[in-house]
Image: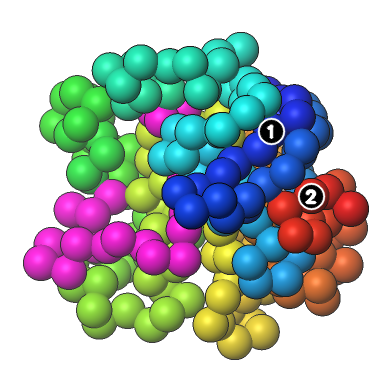
Amino acid sequence: MVSYSSVAKRYPGGQEALKSVSFTLEPGELAFITGRSGAGKSTLLKLIPAIERPSAGSVIVNGQNVGALKRAAIPYLRRNIGMVFQDQKLLYDRSVFDNVMLPLAFSGHAPREAARRARAALDKVGLLGRERSNPIQLSGGEQQRLAIARAVVNRPALLIGDEPTANLDAESAARILDIFVEFNQVGVTVLIATHDQALVERYGRKVLHLEAGRIA
């Protein structure tokens, strides 16, 4: 599903965010990336949907070398990847329902099918009763659940989360992780970056620990 081989990422000015990173994430796996702030967790995740490109090495996602993809091919790559980042990029001038509908509009689904999928995704994260609300009316945990619904509405094979429980209380954080685990249990491959060691220990799955851009 995902394979990193001697991956490095250098930014202008010489900053090395990743150094010779290699690992494999098999289809259907659930794995965590841990490490302190600045260890390279976000950069590692952003290479998967080609938000960033590697400076060296190869990132293979679903058999495609992401670093070699042409710009026009990137939207097709991302259709099979659900992404939940700290900056949720929710649209506050649209309803909860419309936020989830947006990815389906880009992928060309018929309106009736799109609406059915959007409501199914909202139901999965416990927000179906809030579909007419504005995101600003939701709590922090509810906003993160909305971001997850939007990420999975296209039924991706791979779901990635960058600190999806950051700034949430313990109960909300556990609920968010439970949702990721539920998707994994039906076959979705899941990769989550987190600094919350208690949550990692609770779920006890594969763990990749980053230290200064390297897997320790």
Residue 68 lies in the magenta stretch: no
Q: Residue at x 69, y 62 (%)?
A: 39
Q: Secondary structure at mark 2?
A: strand
Give neighbour class at mark 1: few <14, some 14-19, many 20+ (Cα, 10 Å): many
Question: Which of 9 and 34 lies nearest the eye of the viewer?
Answer: 9
Q: Position of residue 75 (x, y in %)?
A: 32, 26
Tell me residue 170's x, y (percent). 66, 84
* Disc ID at residue 24: none
Which residue is identified by label 1? 7
The residue at the point 78 percent across, 56 percent down is 210
**Left or right of 136 on screen, residue 46:** right
Residue 70, x across and y down, in percent = 35, 15
Q: Is residue 73 above or below residue 205?
A: above
Placement of 213 over or under 146, stated as above or below: above
Residue 34 in sight from this viewpoint:
no
Q: Amino acid at mark 1?
A: Val
Q: Is residue 115 visible?
A: yes
For the record, the magenta segment spans 78-100
Residue position marked by numbered label 2 in the rendering: 214
